[in-house]
Amino acid sequence: MKTTFIRLLTACLVLSSSVFAQMPPVVPIWDANKVTLGLHKVATDIYAIIPTTAETETTKGIPQATTGGFIVGDKGVLLIEVMMTKRLYDQEVKLIRSVTDKPIIYAVNTSDHGDHCFSNYLLPPSTRIIQNEFARNNLSKNYDGIKTFMVGLFGTGREIENTIFRTADIVIPKNSDLKVDMGGGKIVELLNISPAQSQADLFVWMPNQKIFWAGNPFIAESPAIPWLFDGVFLEPVVNLKKVYDFLPDDATIIPGHGRITNKAGIKYTIDYVEKLKSEVEAAVDKDLSLEQTKTAVPMKEFDKGYVLFNWLHYNFNLPNAYKDISNNKNK
């Protein structure tokens, strides 16, 4: 199946896709009208912004709202994620203002999914928005369609309808990076290693402090599994492992939708995609059809209570793995 969940944002707009076959078991997956964001000091002048439910619900398999953070520099603030709605953006700003009155000089979107970037229009005009190049191009071409789909998935009456497109000021091409010096040893490296979840991925790494915002490619620790919506599998597997391997063992990891963790906490994603790859390769070698492969590769050892496991595994991750591996075999 070619369609994607939030990638139907682009699937119906960028990819030639079929009708979305199945909605997730819970809609909305999380409710933007109910989320409360909390502040976590990670290091001096470096903060994570995490849903207050993440600490208790992540390991129970309950999907969490978007995480973010900010770095206070000599001249201002670098904000990571602007969130989906004004209600959540306003919470972010309140958290920032609880520790500094410096201006927001940069805002980084780690994805073109609306929950990471829709509130760009609320930023001060002087703030410079940074995105992956694909994200900027896709949003500029397809914003209305992306917004319509987000309303369908997250519900009306959540301020999504009121969002207005605002383009990025700085873009980072694929396989490129950008270093931002915030002063006082706070170097922020923005890494376009994509696709790891989508073509729009952007990772945030602070090498001196060993702090990493992982974005959507590493949604959360166990029992969450990755959301591989983009219609590809083999390239994300390589990039996920590349990102994992470069991180030091003592890095602090802020996943895209979960509580703060460490390198060991995101290993579950690597284990899942590598096992899925090997099992689907075995099925393809036996000339099994996609439907037969779904029966043969249930991956029950990874089904540990994540609410979205069946929806993701059978509708996206496994079919994309089967497609890529089959095509690769026939080359």
Image (tube, grey):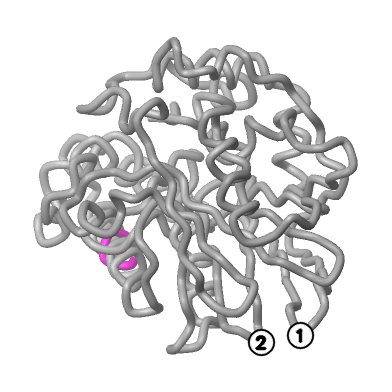
In this rendering, would 138 be left or right of 183? left
Span shown in magenta? 274-278
- In x, y percent, where is residue 93? 63, 44
Left or right: residue 187 compared with residue 41: right
Is residue 275 shown in magenta?
Answer: yes
The quadrant where residue 101 appears: bottom right
Residue bearing mark 2: 208
Instruction: Please tell me whether residue 193 is drawn above or below residue 105 in the rendered image.
Output: below
On the image, numbered disc 1 is attached to which residue?
185
Looking at numbered disc 1 in the image, what kind of residue is underneath it?
Gly
Whether residue 328 is visible, yes or no, is no
* Mark 2 secondary-structure assignment: loop
Q: Which residue is drawn at 61% across and 47% down?
A: 81
**Could one spot residue 268 in this view of the protein?**
yes
Q: Residues within 10 Å of mark 1 (few under 14, many from 20)?
A: few
Image quarter where the N terminus lies is top left
